[in-house]
Structures are given as C-alpha cells and as structure tokens.
Image (tube, helix red, strand yellow):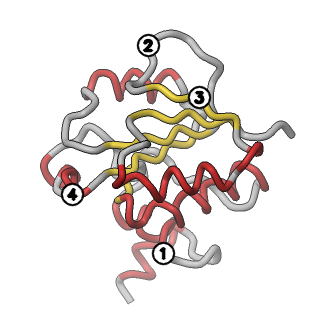
Amino acid sequence: MAQPAILLVGDWQRTEMLPIRDWVDSLGSRGIVEQFNHLPTEMIDPPDLVIVCQSWPDELTAEAVSAALGRWPLALWVCCYGAWCESDGRTRTIWPISVRVPVREAVPRLDHVWQILSEQRGEPLPLTASRDEAFAFDHCSGSFISANLSDTLNR
C-alpha cells in the first residue's frame, strides 16, 4: 500500500500549532504533505488525511468546509483548533463534532488516525459520530465499541 497522503490546511507555523508541526515532522518521508492556507477549491489528488489548523473562529466558512468534506468523502479529517476556538463546538456547527480536537489533545488523535491509515488497525471515526463516540475514539481502548457506547455509559 502507498503511504497515506496528508493535506495541511491553515497556518501550521503558528506557535500554538507546534504540536501539529512536530507530529508531521516526525513522519519524515512517510507522509506526502501538501499545504494550503485555505481549503483548496481546485482539484488536487485526494488526500488520505486532512489536518486543519484553526486559529480563530470562522477562519473557514461553512460553505468551504461543506464543499471540502464532500470533495474528499473518503479522507479522514482532523480539525486541530487553538485556544481562541474553544467555544466553537457549542456556538458553531461548521465542523462536525467527530472532526474537532483541541491542539493540546491533537497528537494522540493524529497517532490513532495514522495507525488506521498506515497500518489498517481499527476503524475510523465517521463524520456523523456523536460527542460520546468521539470521546470513546480518543480516550477508550480499542475494545470499546461505539455501537455499545450508550449501554456502557449508562451502567
């Protein structure tokens, strides 16, 4: 299998995005990286992983995000948001819950997603996942099955 291709969107050179930059750098030549400041509107080869570095609310429009999610439906998405975006999950619906992760928690999420892509270990988190499923994906062992999530949480 070819190495997964990564698309970086946003200003990942900002100081707050250092963990993301370090994670991408740690891949060395294993990740093919393209970078755009905004979601590309022109056709590019479909990425396997899209990492968005979001530094402020509404940095990308809902229309641009929706179009990009539809353009690359098979890609895995991780929107790493900075401190100024902490309340976006309560006040905005631009990014699906399953995609958003704070920068301070992004490296474990990226590691998990990379394992799924490069080693085919585990199942990806669907774009339609609930908040509980996203929590389970990030914080529970591989034996935790999202289909049984509500039963497990209600015990």
Label 4: which residue?
86
Label 1: which residue?
139
Could you give the CA–CA distance between mark 2 and mark 1, rounded to whole angstroms? 34 Å
Could you give the CA–CA distance between mark 4 and mark 2, rounded to whole angstroms? 27 Å
**Which of marks 1 and 3 precedes in the sequence?**
3
Residue at the outermost bottom position:
155
Could you give the CA–CA distance between mark 1 and mark 4, rounded to whole angstroms? 19 Å
Tag 3: residue type?
A: Glu
Image coordinates for residue 151, horizontal then vertical, percent: 43, 79
**Which of marks 2 and 3 precedes in the sequence?**
3
Which of the pair 151/41 is nearer the observer? 41
**Which of marks 1 and 2 precedes in the sequence?**
2
Residue 64, quarter of picture: top left
Task: Find numbered disc 3 in the image and state the secondary structure of the residue it sits on.
Answer: strand
Residue at the outermost right position:
1
**Which of marks 2 and 4 precedes in the sequence?**
2
Image coordinates for residue 122, horizontal then vertical, percent: 69, 61
Label 2: which residue?
41
Could you give the CA–CA distance between mark 3 and mark 1, rounded to whole angstroms? 29 Å
Q: Is residue 106 above or below residue 97?
A: below
Tag 4: residue type?
A: Glu
Disc 1 + disc 4, Cβ < 8 Å: no
> Is 28 placed left or right of 80 in the picture?
right
Tag 1: residue type?
A: His
Q: Comparing marks 3 and 1, which lies closer to the viewer? A: 3
**Which of marks 4 and 1 precedes in the sequence?**
4
Q: Residue at x 24, y 33 (%)?
A: 59
